C-alpha cells in the first residue's frame, strides 16, 4: 500500500506532488508530537501513580522507550555537597554501573562528567568522540559504543544528575531531534522526581515523628511510675521512726511494683565476725527456708561474691553454672533461672547485699533492673547508716555528759566567756536573717577565739569545714528563689542537727556554709562530721512537692601553727572546697599546701597562656578524616597544641579548660584556624590535592560575636584558600544560647561556602528542632557511642538512628574515636560515610601528615 501511494504521488503534477510530500511531512510531525504528548502525559502521571522512586525510574525508562529507541538507559544523581554520583537506575547490554554513592572524581573525563560540568545536552557519535578525545575533553568512556546521548537533570539552576541512552550497533543511531526530545522530557522528569522525593521525605519525617511520639509516651508512663516509686523509697529512708524490719518490707513492696521481686532478700555482712546474716527475706519456695536463710560464715556463695567485688552482679542460668565450674562459687540451686545482686555500700565498704532471683524461664532480669535495684540499695544503705549514727550519737552523748561532769570546774571560765559572746551577738544582730545561723562576722570572731585558746592550750584541737552546695543554682533557676530559700533553711536545720551543740554552723552568703568543730580529741571526729554532712546532702530534699538532689563539695582544714588569724584559715578552707569540686563534687578534701600552689600555678598558667597567644606559640596538630569505603584521607581536624617558650610542649588538657574559663579561647581558636589553613594551602600545592579540607573547632562564644564571619573571611583571604576547603565545628551548647545571633552567623558562613559540623552529637540536648532550624552540613557522632560499638547493641541502635536522621535531613556523618576495625566496618555497613580515630591515624604534627599524603 505504501508503494502505491508513492507511485501515485510521483505520477501527480509537480504542484500536486509537492502538496502530497508536505502532507506526509505534516503527518510525520503530527505523529512525533503525538508521541511526545503521550510520553509527557505518562511522565506527569508517574509522580501520582508511582508509590516511590524505586518504581518510578523503570516507568521513566518505559516512557522514554515509547518515543525513541532506548535499550541502554541510565539515570545518575549528582550530590554537589559530598561530591558523589549515585546510579539510581541503569539498564545496559555491556556496561555495569556501581551501586551506592561513588566519588565524583573517579568519573572525571567521562561523558557523564562532561554533561554535569557544562550543564548542556550532549550527542556523541564515533566521530564526535574521536574529536573530544583529541581535545582532551574525554578521557574515560567505558565500553565503546556507537552513539551516546545524555541530558542534564536541572533543579533550581543546579545540575542534580544526568539521563542518558546509548547504542552499541549501527541499526540504532541518534539524531538532533532525539537530543531535543530527551532534553524536553528531562525537566518533566525532574519535576516528577522532585515531587516523589518530597513525598518520600515527608513520609519518612511523619513516620519518624510518630515513632518518636509513641516512644515518648511509653517512656513518660514508665518514668512516672519509676519516679513515684523512688520518691516513696526516699521518703521511707528519711523517716528514721520506722522500724528497720518494717522498712525492709515496705521497700520490698515498692520494688515489687517495678519488677518481679517475688524472691527477695537482704543480707548484712559483719566484717569483724566474718558472717552473713539475712535480715529480711521473701521466698516463693517454702522448702528449707530456715536453713537456707540462717546466719552463716562468709564463704563462696553468690551473695559473698557481690560483697567481695563491691559491684552489681547480673547472671543467667548458664553464667551461674560457669562460675561454679570455674570454682569461683559454691554449687548453685538448679532451679534458679536469673539472679541479680547489688552491694549495700557505706564509706566505700560493702556492708551487705540485696538480691532478687527468678525460678521461671520467662522472668529474666536485665541491666535496667540492675540499675533500679542499685538505686534502691543506696537508700537501704542510708537507712542502715542513719540508725547506726543515731545509736552512735546516743553513745557519744552519754560519754560527753560524763566528760562534762568531770570537766565542769575546768570549763566554767570558758562557759562564762561563751555566754558573754552570745549576749553580744544578740544585740549586734549577727545572725543570718534567712537561716538563723551565725554570720561571717560571728564565725570569724569565734574562729579567732579558737586560735587564741589553742595558743594557750595546745591540746584544744579544732577544725573548720567549708562547704558549698553543688547544684543550688539549678534549683534557683528552675524552681525560683523562693524554693532556693526553702532549701537553704532545710540545709541549715540539717547541719545544726548533725554537728555537736558546742560546734558552730555559719552561713557566709549564697549557698556557702562553714562549720567550726572544737575540742577535737582526734582528727577522725572531723572526718566523721564531714561524712555525715556529705551523706545528708546526697539525699533528696522535698521542695514544693518534688524531690531535689543537690550534693556538696567540702574543704576540711585543721588548726596549725601557720595560722594566726581566721581570714587566712577561711581562705585555705575555701581553696580545699574548690579542690573538692575539681575532683568531681559530692566529696570533701583536706587542705594541704599543694592546693595553694595549684591556685598560684593556675594564675601563672593564665599569664603564660596570654603571653603565648601574643607570641603565636599555639599551633595545630592534625588528625586525618577518612572515607570509610576506601580509607582515603579526605580532610583533617585541627587540634590545638602549645609549644611554650617557658613550659615546653603543653598538652591541651592542661590549658583548654583554663582558656575557656578566661575567654582566651577566642583568640586561640582563630590563631589555630589561620595556621591550619596556611598548612592546608601548602599541602594542596605540594601534593596537588585540591580536594582536601581542614576542620577547625570553634568555642560556642564565637557564634555570639557578630564579627565572626568577617574574622574568618579575613583569614581565608590572608592564607589564600577557598571557603569550601574550610569547615568549622561547634557543639550543641552554642545552638541553645543567643540562638538568633548564632543562626545569623551560621547563615553568613554558609553563604561564604564554609561547611558547618555539629561536634559530639548525641551527648547533649540532641533536639530535632535545632537540626531543622540551623544550616548544619555534617553530624559528628560522639566517640562515647563509637568505642566498642560492635559489642554494644544499644549504641548500634543509637548510631543507626543518628545516621538515618542525618540522611533524611541531607546531612553527612563522621564517626569519631574509631579504635577498632570491627567498629569501622560496622559504621560502613550503617552507611556512615566518614570516620576518624586512632585505628586510622592519631593526631600528628604537619611533618608526619606529609608522610601519609606522600
Image (cartoon, rainbow, N blue to C red):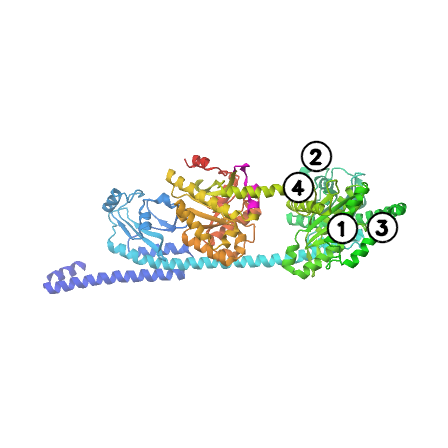
Earlier in the chain: of badge 1 and badge 3, it is 3
Camera-side mark, 2 or 4: 4
The alpha-carbon separation of the residues under discs 1 and 4 comes to 26 Å
Q: Name the disc covering residue 415, or none.
A: 3
Q: Estimate the x, y position of residue 83 in percent, counting from the top left.
A: 39, 48
Task: Mark 2: give few (<14), some (14-19) or many (20+) Cα within 10 Å.
Answer: few
Q: Check disc 1 and report the residue beneath it.
A: 445
In this rendered view, identify the residue nearer to me: 570 or 313.
570
Earlier in the chain: of badge 2 and badge 1, it is 2
Q: Name the disc covering residue 327, or none.
A: 2
The alpha-carbon separation of the residues under discs 3 and 2 comes to 65 Å
Task: Mark 4: give few (<14), some (14-19) or many (20+) Cα within 10 Å.
Answer: some
Q: Quadrant of the N terminus?
A: bottom left
Camera-side mark, 3 or 2: 3
Question: Under tag 3, what secondary structure?
Answer: helix
| Residue 837 against residue 264 in the figure, above or below | above
The alpha-carbon separation of the residues under discs 2 and 4 comes to 48 Å
Q: Quadrant of the C terminus?
A: top left
Q: Estimate the x, y position of residue 756 in percent, counting from the top left.
A: 46, 51
Earlier in the chain: of badge 3 and badge 2, it is 2
Write down the region rendered in magenta: 644-659
Contact check, label 1 and label 4, Cβ < 8 Å: no
**Residue, x 46% and y 35% (percent of image)?**
848
In this rendered view, identify the residue nearer to me: 93 or 241.
241
The alpha-carbon separation of the residues under discs 4 and 3 comes to 36 Å
Earlier in the chain: of badge 1 and badge 4, it is 1
Is-magenta flag for residue 658?
yes
The alpha-carbon separation of the residues under discs 2 and 1 comes to 64 Å
Q: Quadrant of residue 144?
A: top left
Amino acid at each position: 500500500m505504501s508503494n502505491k501511494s508513492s507511485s501515485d504521488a510521483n505520477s501527480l503534477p509537480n504542484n500536486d506532488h509537492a502538496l502530497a510530500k508536505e502532507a506526509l511531512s505534516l503527518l510525520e510531525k503530527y505523529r512525533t508530537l503525538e508521541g511526545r504528548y503521550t510520553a509527557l502525559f505518562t511522565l506527569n502521571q508517574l509522580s501520582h501513580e508511582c508509590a516511590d522512586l524505586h518504581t518510578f525510574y523503570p516507568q521513566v525508562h518505559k516512557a522514554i522507550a515509547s518515543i525513541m529507541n532506548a535499550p541502554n538507559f541510565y539515570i545518575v544523581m549528582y550530590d554537589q555537597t559530598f561530591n558523589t554520583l549515585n546510579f539510581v537506575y541503569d539498564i545496559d547490554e555491556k556496561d555495569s554501573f556501581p551501586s551506592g554513592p561513588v566519588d565524583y572524581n573517579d568519573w572525571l573525563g567521562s561523558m557523564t562528567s562532561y554533561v554535569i560540568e557544562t550543564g548542556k545536552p550532549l550527542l556523541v557519535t564515533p566521530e564526535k568522540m574521536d574529536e573530544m578525545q583529541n581535545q582532551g575533553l574525554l578521557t574515560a568512556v567505558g565500553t565503546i559504543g556507537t552513539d551516546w546521548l545524555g541530558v542534564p537533570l536541572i533543579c533550581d539552576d543546579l545540575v542534580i544528575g544526568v539521563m542518558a541512552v546509548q547504542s552499541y550497533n549501527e541499526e540504532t543511531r541518534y539524531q538532533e531531534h532525539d537530543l531535543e526530545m530527551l532534553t524536553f522530557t528531562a525537566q518533566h522528569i525532574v519535576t516528577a522526581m522532585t515531587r516523589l522525593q518530597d513525598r518520600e521525605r515527608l513520609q519518612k519525617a511523619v513516620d519518624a515523628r510518630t515513632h518518636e511520639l509513641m516512644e515518648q509516651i511509653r517512656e513518660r508512663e514508665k518514668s512516672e511510675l519509676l519516679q513515684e516509686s523512688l520518691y516513696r523509697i526516699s521518703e521511707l529512708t528519711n523517716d528514721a521512726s520506722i522500724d528497720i524490719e518494717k522498712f525492709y518490707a515496705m521497700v520490698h513492696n515498692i520494688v515489687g511494683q517495678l519488677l518481679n521481686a517475688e524472691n527477695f532478700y537482704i543480707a548484712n555482712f559483719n566484717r569483724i565476725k566474718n558472717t552473713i546474716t539475712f535480715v529480711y527475706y521473701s521466698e516463693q519456695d517454702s522448702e528449707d527456708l530456715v536453713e537456707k536463710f540462717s546466719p552463716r560464715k562468709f564463704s563462696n556463695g553468690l551473695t559473698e561474691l557481690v560483697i567481695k567485688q563491691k559491684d552489681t552482679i547480673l547472671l543467667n542460668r548458664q553464667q551461674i553454672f560457669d562460675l561454679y565450674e570455674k570454682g569461683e562459687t559454691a554449687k548453685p540451686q538448679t532451679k534458679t533461672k536469673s539472679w541479680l545482686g547489688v552491694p549495700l555500700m557505706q564509706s566505700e565498704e560493702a556492708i551487705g547485699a540485696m538480691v532478687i532471683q527468678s525460678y521461671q524461664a520467662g522472668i529474666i532480669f536485665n541491666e535496667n533492673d540492675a540499675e533500679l535495684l542499685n538505686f534502691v540499695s543506696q537508700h537501704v544503705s542510708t537507712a542502715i547508716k542513719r540508725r547506726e549514727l543515731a545509736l552512735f550519737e546516743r553513745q557519744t552523748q552519754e560519754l560527753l555528759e560524763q566528760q562534762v561532769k568531770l570537766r565542769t570546774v575546768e570549763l566554767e571560765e570558758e562557759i562564762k566567756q561563751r555566754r558573754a559572746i552570745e549576749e553580744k551577738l544578740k544585740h549586734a544582730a549577727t545572725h543570718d536573717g534567712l537561716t538563723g545561723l551565725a554570720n561571717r562576722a560571728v564565725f570569724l570572731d569565734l574562729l579567732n577565739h579558737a586560735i587564741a585558746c589553742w595558743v594557750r592550750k595546745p591540746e584544744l584541737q579544732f577544725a573548720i569545714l567549708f562547704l558549698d552546695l553543688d547544684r543550688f543554682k539549678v534549683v534557683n533557676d528552675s524552681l525560683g528563689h523562693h524554693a532556693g530559700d526553702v532549701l537553704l533553711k532545710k540545709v541549715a536545720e540539717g547541719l545544726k542537727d548533725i554537728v555537736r551543740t558546742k560546734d558552730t554552723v555559719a552561713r557566709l552568703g549564697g549557698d556557702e556554709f562553714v562549720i567550726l568543730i572544737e575540742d577535737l580529741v582526734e582528727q577522725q571526729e572531723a572526718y566523721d562530721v564531714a561524712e555525715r554532712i556529705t551523706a545528708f546532702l546526697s539525699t533528696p530534699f522535698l521542695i514544693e512537692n518534688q524531690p531535689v538532689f543537690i550534693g556538696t563539695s567540702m574543704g576540711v582544714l585543721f588548726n596549725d601553727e601557720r595560722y594566726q588569724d581566721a581570714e587566712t584559715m577561711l581562705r585555705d578552707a575555701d581553696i580545699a572546697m574548690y579542690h573538692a569540686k575539681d575532683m568531681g563534687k559530692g566529696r570533701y578534701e583536706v587542705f594541704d599546701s599543694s592546693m595553694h600552689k595549684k591556685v598560684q600555678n593556675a594564675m601563672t598558667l593564665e599569664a603564660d597562656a596570654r603571653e603565648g597567644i601574643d607570641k603565636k606559640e599555639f599551633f595545630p596538630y592534625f588528625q586525618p578524616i577518612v572515607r570509610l569505603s576506601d580509607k582515603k584521607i579526605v580532610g583533617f581536624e585541627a587540634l590545638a597544641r602549645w609549644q611554650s617558650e617557658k613550659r615546653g610542649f603543653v598538652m591541651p588538657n592542661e590549658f583548654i579548660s583554663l582558656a575557656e574559663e578566661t575567654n582566651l579561647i577566642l583568640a586561640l581558636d582563630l590563631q589555630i584556624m589561620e595556621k591550619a589553613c596556611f598548612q592546608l594551602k601548602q599541602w594542596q600545592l605540594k601534593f596537588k590535592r585540591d580536594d582536601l579540607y581542614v576542620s577547625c573547632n570553634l568555642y560556642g562564644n564565637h557564634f555570639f560575636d557578630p564579627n565572626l564571619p568577617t574574622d574568618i573571611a579575613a583569614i581565608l583571604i590572608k592564607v589564600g584558600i577557598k571557603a569550601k576547603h574550610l569547615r568549622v565545628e561547634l557543639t550543641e551548647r552554642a545552638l541553645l544560647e543567643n540562638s538568633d545571633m548564632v543562626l545569623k552567623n551560621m547563615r553568613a558562613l554558609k553563604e561564604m561556602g564554609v561547611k558547618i559540623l555539629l561536634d559530639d552529637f548525641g551527648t547533649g540536648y540532641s533536639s530535632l528542632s535545632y537540626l531543622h532550624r540551623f544550616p548544619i552540613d555534617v553530624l559528628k557522632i560522639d566517640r562515647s557511642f563509637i568505642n566498642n560499638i560492635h559489642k554494644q547493641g544499644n549504641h548500634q541502635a543509637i548510631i543507626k538512628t543518628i545516621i538515618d536522621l542525618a540522611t533524611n535531613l541531607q546531612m553527612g556523618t563522621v564517626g569519631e574515636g574509631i579504635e577498632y576495625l570491627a567498629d569501622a566496618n560496622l559504621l560502613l555497613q550503617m552507611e556512615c560515610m566518614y570516620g576518624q580515630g586512632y585505628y586510622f591515624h592519631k593526631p600528628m604534627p604537619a611533618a608526619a601528615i606529609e608522610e601519609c599524603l606522600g
